[in-house]
Amino acid sequence: MKIAIFGGSFDPPHKGHIAIIEQILQTLDIDLLIILVAYQNPLKAHYRIHAHKRFAWMQILSKHYKKTLCSDYEIQQNKVVTTMESVCYFQKLYKPSKIYFVLGQDNFLQVPQWHDFISLRKCLCFVVFRRITAESASTEENTQALCEQFAKKFMLTMQYLYFAYPYASSLIVQNMAQYKNEIPISIRNDVIESYATINKT
């Protein structure tokens, strides 16, 4: 069995997340894609929307895709969970022959700083994507080369994933009115109302 783990805060989920899910399913030879909603991203001071709400949104968005599982494992721990903890949990649960770990280029370049990096290096194939805008598309070849050189330096198994989406969750939240169409229609009203509520407090 081969699995892929796509983790994140999804704060909020947007069309880019859906596009990544679709590309993973189309590109990787896997039996299961695990969408892992973080209780708390250790690189961020706090979450904007509680994890249970973010998990419910991702359940709605992923239910139409085959070979996907939206997991609340990290949420159930009620604390910040390291990547290695989650990987060990899914290793024991599924006993996969291969684990892909999907992440953005910015996070990939920080992997050597992660907890239990040596163990992660041994058991994961990192699938790295980068947001591509019209302005940055011409530099994509250099970006892939940078990731490949980094992987070689730190003895990481890496696969580069071409991906075009220019917006981050933080940008969408900063101007929800302008970017509301980036929120999938099935959760759009709930997302807008949820962030409007916290902005008033």
Image: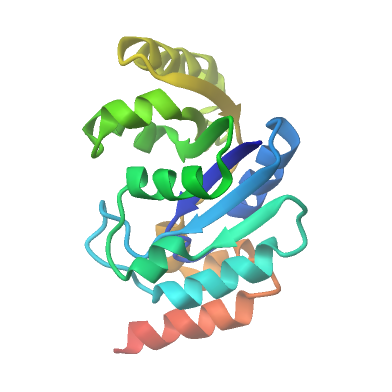
| Residue in the foreground of this view, choosing between 87 and 29 | 87
| Percent x, y of residue 9 | 42, 59
| Percent x, y of residue 89 | 43, 50
Number of disc labels: 0
If the image is split into quadrants, where does the C terminus sit?
bottom left
| Residue in the foreground of this view, choosing between 71 and 198 | 71
At a point 51% along the width and 51% down the height, the residue shown is 167
| Percent x, y of residue 172 | 48, 62
Q: Is residue 92 above or below residue 29?
A: below
If the image is split into quadrants, where does the N terminus sit?
top right
| Residue in the foreground of this view, choosing between 71 and 50 | 71
At a point 47% along the width and 14% down the height, the residue shown is 142
Q: Dividing the picture into quarters, in which one does residue 69 lie?
A: bottom right
| Percent x, y of residue 107 | 36, 37
Can residue 14 be seen here? no
Q: What sort of colour scheme is used for the picture?
A: rainbow
Q: Is residue 28 above or below residue 25?
A: above
Can residue 104 be seen here? yes
Q: Is residue 183 above or below residue 124?
A: below
Left-right relation of 178 to 197:
right
Q: Is residue 44 above or below residue 195?
A: above
At a point 48% along the width and 21% down the height, the residue shown is 158
| Residue in the foreground of this view, choosing between 60 and 14 | 60
At a point 32% along the width and 63% down the height, the residue shown is 40
